[in-house]
């Protein structure tokens, strides 16, 4: 990736004020010029899962021969494949005592906006992605975050999907998560890895060494203090041709009181 100039992604589409038909035509023309990049892997029966979740089941419900149409039955956790975790996943209440929002209660405005890819491929499995790492990645692409940007953490771990190494990754910590959410105004942060925190192995080792529970899921639990959404199991961030100046859509499926929602995450690049 190479950093674009400062005006990249800030162009506005001006439509002649000649009625609805011309406005729609201009919108369709603009949409037709966009390139769409898929940032989600395909869910299948071999999708890697946390040990507390059952493996995905995808089976025919009926077929063309007997019913003249086809349909499948699917059964899997809401945390399968690319998904958006809601604040309710981190705890039932936020730090201010208000009920944590489930996936169906979150504003849609959070899930479409300007995207920013931060290259963190140099971080080793088990490493924390710290504030300094985020600042360095931003400096390399000459970009300053603004509220509501959708931040995508590029670790390269998605290339290990369906291998044991997929579970080995760098991850966010409490301080770096709160830096994005509280200080930069970010509501949605995604990562192309199995989880948002470091591997459970690394968290457990630190807990056993210190006896301090702060080492367990620190980035997740930061969402109790400052509500935000994380996207886990992204893919193909290397296919997005520039680190900013593009749009991201990551709308989660709407399930009542769900702790997460499946999402087909896409990047739109003009």
Image: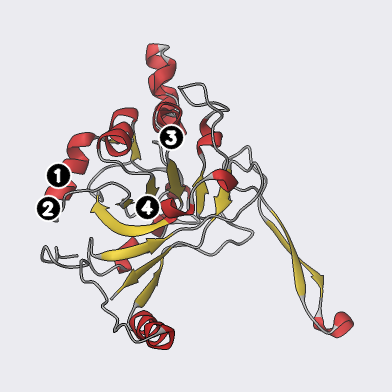
Asked whether the residues under the numbered discs 2 and 1 touch, taking CB atoms below 8 Å apart as contact, a structural biologist would say: yes
- Nearer the observer: mark 4 or 2; the answer is 2
- State how far apart marks 2 and 1 are (Cα): 6 Å
Q: Does the image show residue 261?
A: yes
Which residue is identified by label 3? 227
- State how far apart marks 2 and 3 are (Cα): 28 Å
Residue neighbourhood size for the residue with mark 2, other residues' Cα within 10 Å, grouped as few (<14), some (14–19), many (≥20): few
Asked which secondary structure carries label 1, the reply is helix
Which residue is identified by label 1? 136
Q: Position of residue 219 (x, y in %)?
A: 39, 32
- Nearer the observer: mark 4 or 1; the answer is 1
Which residue is identified by label 4? 157
- State how far apart marks 4 and 1 are (Cα): 20 Å
Q: Is residue 260 above or below residue 234?
A: above
Q: Is residue 100 above or below residue 269?
A: above
Asked whether the residues under the numbered discs 4 and 3 touch, taking CB atoms below 8 Å apart as contact, a structural biologist would say: no
Identify the residue at image location x=49%, y=49%. 107
């Amino acid at each position: 990736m190479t950093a674009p100039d400062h005006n990249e992604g800030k162009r506005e589409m001006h439509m002649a004020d000649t009625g609805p038909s011309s406005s729609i035509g201009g919108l369709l023309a603009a949409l037709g010029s966009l390139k769409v990049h898929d940032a989600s892997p395909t869910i299948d029966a071999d999708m890697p899962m946390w040990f507390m979740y059952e493996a995905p089941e995808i089976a025919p419900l009926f077929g063309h021969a007997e019913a003249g149409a086809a349909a499948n039955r699917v059964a899997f956790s809401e945390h399968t494949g690319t998904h958006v975790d809601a604040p309710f996943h981190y705890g039932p209440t936020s730090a201010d005592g208000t009920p944590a929002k489930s996936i169906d209660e979150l504003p849609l405005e959070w899930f479409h906006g300007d995207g920013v890819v931060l290259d963190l491929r140099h971080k080793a499995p088990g490493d924390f992605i710290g504030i300094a790492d985020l600042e360095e990645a931003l400096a390399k692409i000459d970009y300053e975050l603004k509220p509501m940007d959708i931040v995508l953490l590029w670790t390269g771990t998605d290339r290990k999907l369906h291998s044991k190494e997929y579970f080995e990754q760098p991850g966010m910590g409490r301080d770096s998560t709160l830096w994005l959410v509280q200080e930069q105004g970010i509501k949605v942060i995604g990562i192309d890895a199995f989880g948002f925190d470091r591997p459970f192995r690394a968290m457990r080792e630190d807990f056993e060494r210190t006896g301090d529970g702060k080492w367990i899921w620190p980035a997740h639990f930061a969402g109790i203090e400052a509500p935000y959404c994380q996207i886990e199991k992204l893919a193909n961030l290397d296919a997005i041709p520039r680190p900013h100046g593009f749009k991201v859509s990551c709308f989660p499926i709407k399930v009542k009181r769900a702790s997460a929602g499946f999402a087909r995450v896409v990047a739109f690049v003009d």
